[in-house]
Amino acid sequence: MIKSLSTIFLFLLCSLAVHAQNEISVRMEVPQEVVAGQEFLVSVEIEKGNLEEFSRFQQELPAGFTAVQENSGAADFSFDNQRVRFIWLKLPAQAILSISYRVKVQERLKGNLTLFGEFSYVENNERRSIVIDKKSVNILPSPDVAAADQVEIKDFAAIMSAEQADVASSISVTAIRQLPFASKTGNDIMVHILVYKKSMNKFAKIEERIPDGFEAKSMESADGLFTFKNGVAKYVWMNLPEEPGFKVSYRLIPEAGKTLNDLVVDGTLSYIQEGRNIEVKVIQEDIDLSGVNSENAAAVVAAISKGETVPVQKVEKQVTLVKPPPVEEKKEPVLKETRATTGTGSSGIPKTQLLAVSDGVYFRVQLAATKRLQDAASSFSKFRFSRPVLIESHQGYYKYSVGSYPNYSQARTSRNTAASKGISGAFIVAYRNGRRIDIMDALQATGGK
């Protein structure tokens, strides 16, 4: 009898030990309060039990908050559409995983931020999840922002949308950069920017962020003050020119070994309206601005905004300074993409660039999204992708992606390649029979590969 009781007792102890080993828990730590305009750290600890296969931590952030990785814990980190994600194809061996990221708070915000999240995993071929306990962060108003300009977190998205609409209706300010091209003589690279600002004539500046290995020299300044320091080419006007549209130009001198293929320029036009700083992104178009002047600037801008033919000469071909050596690409299984060769689809996308429906589960790498249809071939030609950039119409946007890949690891390699070429916002998307699905579902369907 005593021996039987001992056996039962040992069995219960073993059962408790196995249960403790399999127990999964997630804890999140955040500060109690943060001043708007500053950053704060979100730390997460995951006791993973005996989990080994792919898992995911994700969290939604309200408008006005942005996230950057601090410690990935060997996961694949991403932040897009206000969603923080950590994805593990295979979990590390340690029993407790630590991940963290920094959250930037928009300076106009105030109020209480409630953070929660979800840790998802697959166990016994079933998808399971743990909802993390909610945490609150009190966002204190910034002392540098007037009370009238402070916005409650819950109202921020709607107010920002309304303010942007008001600004757009009251004044149309546009900055368009011609696709940089090699000069006909020498190794210099030429950059032209068209500014259309209607009757605005006060302070403004253009800031162009230039990658390492290039030096900028001004050619046309339109009476602005030009400087180049720490990789930023800047034009500053205390009073803008009287013409509603004007052009500035600069040339880039590459260091030895640098070519047009290494160049990715990102810029903004900033100005003051009603005491508030407004930023407009400099958009890049494959057009020739050499024939643009104050008389036809308005027509050029109107044509671009409507997607019509620009009333100036089209750039026929971009010149590569140095032809790069051929790169031998590793042969990998790729899903077949069948596309028509002529005409346009119902969404107006040329059939040669239309993302076709493929069978099964697959992954692609999204590079960009626009409200107005762009030509994928010319827009992404300088990045020299080994596979074509295709377009789909999704949720009111034209979305541009490369692929398709039968497993996540190939898509991740492609995403990293896009990032190395300068497209830092590229991210992985998943499909089943042509329809977008959750990454977690796709990983489960493909066995976590």
Image (spheres, grey):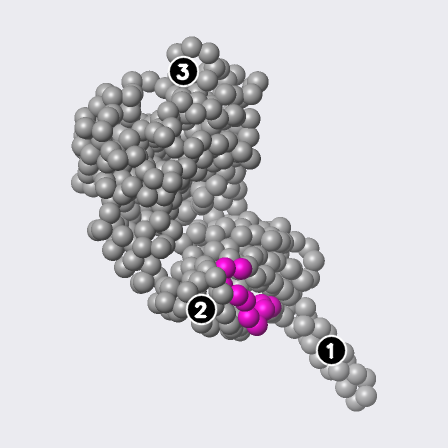
Say which amino acid is labelled 3.
Ser
Does the segment drawn in magenta span residue 122?
no
Q: Which residue is mark 3?
A: 183
Question: From the viewer's perspective, is 270 left or right of 292?
Answer: right
Residue 335 is situated, as x and y percent measured from the top left of the image, at: 40, 36
Name the image quarter holding residue 100: bottom right
Residue 348 seen anywhere in this rendered image of the structure: no
Question: Could you tell me which residue is drawn at 50 percent across and 38 percent down?
Answer: 419
Name the image quarter holding residue 106: bottom left
Q: Which residue is mark 2?
A: 110
How many angstroms separate mark 2 from mark 3 (CA)?
50 Å
Vertical arrangement, residue 303 with respect to residue 59, above or below: above
Q: Earlier in the sequence, mark 3 or mark 1?
A: 1
Residue 290 is situated, as x and y percent measured from the top left of the image, at: 29, 21
Say which amino acid is labelled 2.
Lys
Q: Residues within 10 Å of mark 2 (few under 14, many from 20)?
A: many
Q: Secondary structure at mark 1?
A: helix
